[in-house]
Amino acid sequence: MSPALGPDWARLFTSFDRVPFAAASIGQVRIAAAQFPNIASSIARDLGYISLLLTAGRLLPKGLFLERTMQVMKAEFADECDYTCEAGFLHAFGDHLGGDARLTVPGVWDGSTERVLVMEHGAPGPARPRQGASSL
């Protein structure tokens, strides 16, 4: 938290539970999502190793566009590691819903950063299909 929000980050919150209630693939889940240190560079490095192994080991059939595939994967993982992108997706999703009062998209705290995402927290409600919607 300190690298993203500064050494006095705890003062930014009225309260903060230091024990995460879940772990995610690239971070810990509290009310704020806090990314593991250096995860973005670790993912980029691992993708480089995978590319090297696949190329050197001749494990791929001819004609497979490994370079382009790896570029796309690196870009997707970079977006996944950028919580400002996630915040943008939340805003866009809320806009897409058009103010439907039955649905709530959490607000994003303005102090969120590329590595820490803080959202509103509300009590979950029941998920029910809309009238006329087919069930699976």
Image (tube, rainbow, N blue to C red):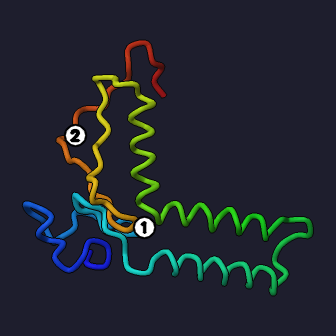
Categorize mark 2 by other alpha carbons within 10 Å: few (<14), some (14-19), many (20+): few
Q: Secondary structure at mark 1?
A: loop
- Name the residue that disc number 1 marks: 25
In-image side of 105 versus 65 (left or right): left
Say how many tags the image has: 2
The image quadrant that residue 52 belongs to is: bottom right
Image spot of residue 30 (x, y percent): 23, 62
The image quadrant that residue 26 belongs to is: bottom left
In this view, the residue in front, 58 or 18, is: 18
Type of amino acid at the residue the image marks with label 1: Ser
Work out whether 6 lies above or below 102: below
Type of amino acid at the residue the image marks with label 2: Pro
Q: Residue at 29% across / 34% down in the picture? A: 104
Q: Which mark is first along the chain, 2 or 1?
A: 1
In this view, the residue in front, 32 or 12, is: 12
In this view, the residue in front, 83 or 18, is: 83
The answer to the question of whether label 1 and label 2 lie on touching residues, with beta carbons closer than 8 A, is no
- Separation of residues labelled 1 and 2 (CA atoms): 22 Å
Image spot of residue 122 (x, y percent): 19, 43
- Image quarter of the N terminus: bottom left
Image spot of residue 74 (x, y percent): 63, 68
In this view, the residue in front, 54 or 106, is: 106
Q: Secondary structure at mark 2?
A: loop
In-image side of 114 versus 71 (left or right): left
Work out whether 136 lies above or below 120: above
Which mark, residue 124?
2
In-image side of 123 versus 60 (left or right): left
Q: Residue at 81% across / 85% down in the picture? A: 57
Image spot of residue 94 (x, y percent): 38, 35
